């Protein structure tokens, strides 16, 4: 079997933890920040878990991490 290729776009966007959970960054933190509350902006800066529906697809794009 040949080596599997990692999806480079997925590698930049997702992180797999030591317990094989998949994290992603939240959207809507890049611009038009003046109308967003400080609490909202603070929470948008944190990582979040990838939903169960998407987890299998992300793991297949990251074969050597997951």
Image (spheres, helix red, strand yellow):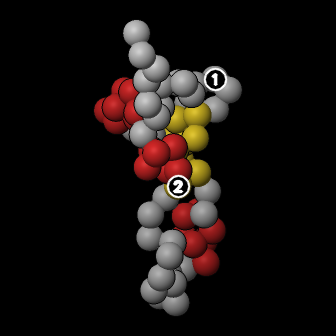
Q: Are marks 2 and 1 in contact (CB under 8 Å)?
A: no
Residue that appears at 63% across and 23% down: 19
Residue that appears at 57% across and 27% down: 65
Q: Position of residue 14 (x, y in %)?
A: 52, 44
53 and 3: which is toward the camera:
3
Q: Earlier in the sequence, mark 2 or mark 1?
A: 1
**Taking 36 as reference, is 51 above or below it?**
above
Residue with the most extreme bottom position: 34
Residue with the most extreme front position: 2
Residue that appears at 44% across and 70% down: 28
Q: Position of residue 20 (x, y in %)?
A: 58, 25
The crowding category of the residue bearing disc 1, from other C-alpha atoms within 10 Å (few below 14, some 14 to 19, many at least 20), is: few
Q: Is residue 25 left or right of residue 2?
A: right
Q: Is residue 52 left or right of residue 29?
A: left
Q: Which mark is residue 19?
A: 1
Q: Is residue 55 visible?
A: no
Residue 59, image quadrant? top left
- Which residue does the numbered mark 2 point to in the structure image? 25
15 and 21: which is toward the camera:
15
- Tag 1, which secondary structure? loop
Q: Position of residue 37 (x, y in %)?
A: 54, 79
Q: CA distance from mark 2 to mark 1?
A: 18 Å
Count of marks, rendered view? 2
Residue with the most extreme top position: 1
The crowding category of the residue bearing disc 2, from other C-alpha atoms within 10 Å (few below 14, some 14 to 19, many at least 20), is: some
Q: Is residue 2 visible?
A: yes
- Tag 2, which secondary structure? strand
Q: Which mark is residue 5?
A: none
Q: Quadrant location of the N terminus? A: top left
Q: Position of residue 4 (x, y in %)?
A: 43, 24
Residue that appears at 58% across and 51% down: 47
């Amino acid at each position: 079997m040949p080596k599997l290729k990692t999806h480079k776009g997925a590698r930049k966007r997702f992180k797999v933890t030591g317990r094989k959970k998949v994290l992603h960054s939240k959207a809507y933190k890049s611009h038009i920040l003046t109308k967003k509350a400080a609490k909202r902006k603070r929470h948008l800066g944190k990582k979040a878990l990838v939903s169960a529906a998407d987890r299998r697809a992300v793991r297949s794009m990251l074969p050597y991490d997951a």
